[in-house]
Amino acid sequence: MVINDNEVQPVSDFNILVVKATKGTLSPIYVWGHENGVAGAPSVKVAFAHVNLGAENDTDPCNCLGDLYQWGRKKDGHQVRTSASYPTNDTSAESGIATAADLDVNGQIAEGNAREGKFIKQTDYPMSWRPINNPSMVGLWGDNTTETSANYNQARGTADPCPTGWKVPSQKQWSAIYQGNQTNGAPEASTSGSTWTKQGKFTSNGGGSTSGYKVADALYLPTAGYRHLSWGSLHAASQYGDYWSSTIHSSSHTTYKLYFYNNTVLPGDFGDRANAYVVRCVPE
């Protein structure tokens, strides 16, 4: 890295490295994490974007919540927190799952389809916004490896919503900054070299404020909430944090995510793909 305009120093000389962010773009923050996300492995620098995807233009940390994505979907407007739901509204449980005929050649909602740009509600098994195997969801986000063979540094998927040069992190990239593997526990149990510090009350509606965790006093992960798969309504903002990964679960209709709440961190949690959670990109 270059400091003081012209002095070059190795990144390893710094406990954390925060790169100056430019409004409207993502910038990396480097913190300590277990190499390759393996418990007990040496600590190395791990980079995450400075805000959730969709919060690039926010300057108030309490409002940097970002967009909410259904897993495997591209950025088409459905991710906006106030986007319309399909079939109708956010007050009743309905199913609007897409069929193969509703998809384009890339496995996304076809242009002009009634579901385009909308949060697709789902009430039936498997809890996905579209068929899970027809056509295949392989490669939409990540490389389709499951927990038994998952790669740490997965390839960018064909529908990855992150901007060029960034991608959705793998489950192992999330676990790297906690205890490695899929170990769950209290925030203070982190063994990565990066501390987890609780911020806020972690209560329903938050008393008007956002909760979350600071990782290494540099990387802030807010409780951004999620959109419920069968209702389309927003839930748990200020109470729970759910962050997608690119690593699919062996159940075939669920995907791993980082999940945290008051005094508990779960980097090995997983959720139904019709739910909409936030994305925190990592450098490609």
Image: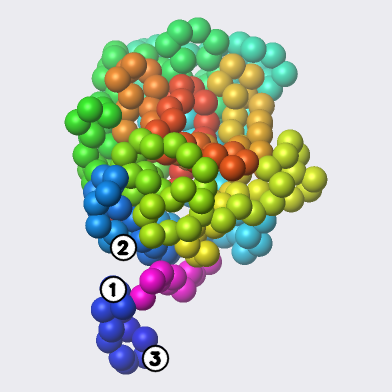
Mark 3 or mark 2: whose residue is earlier in sequence: 3
Q: Which residues are magenta?
A: 14-23
The amino acid at mark 2 is Lys
The amino acid at mark 1 is Ser
Percent across and percent down for residue 229 are: 56, 21
Question: From what the image shows, is residue 164 above or below residue 79?
Answer: below
The amino acid at mark 3 is Asn
Residue nearest the observer in this picture, 282 or 171: 171
Distance from Cα at disc 3 to Cα at disc 2: 22 Å
Percent across and percent down for residue 129 are: 45, 20
Q: Are marks 3 and 2 in contact (CB under 8 Å)?
A: no
Q: Secondary structure at mark 2?
A: strand
Q: Secondary structure at mark 3?
A: loop
Q: What label sits on residue 45 in the rendered view? A: 2
Question: From what the image shows, is residue 246 above or below residue 1?
Answer: above
Distance from Cα at disc 1 to Cα at disc 3: 17 Å
Mark 1 or mark 3: whose residue is earlier in sequence: 3
Q: What label sits on residue 23 in the rendered view? A: none
**Looking at the image, which residue is at 28% across and 73% down?**
12
Q: Main secondary structure of the magenta part?
A: loop
Percent across and percent down for residue 187 are: 52, 47
Mark 1 or mark 2: whose residue is earlier in sequence: 1
Percent across and percent down for residue 5 are: 37, 90
Q: Residue furthest right?
A: 207
Can you identify the residue that label 3 sits on?
A: 4
Distance from Cα at disc 1 to Cα at disc 2: 8 Å
Q: Please indicate, yes or no, whether residue 280 appears anywhere in the rendered image.
A: yes
Magenta span includes 16 = yes
**Looking at the image, which residue is at 36% across and 36% down?**
182
Q: Secondary structure at mark 1?
A: helix
**Looking at the image, which residue is at 31% across and 78% down?**
13
Q: Are marks 1 and 3 in contact (CB under 8 Å)?
A: no
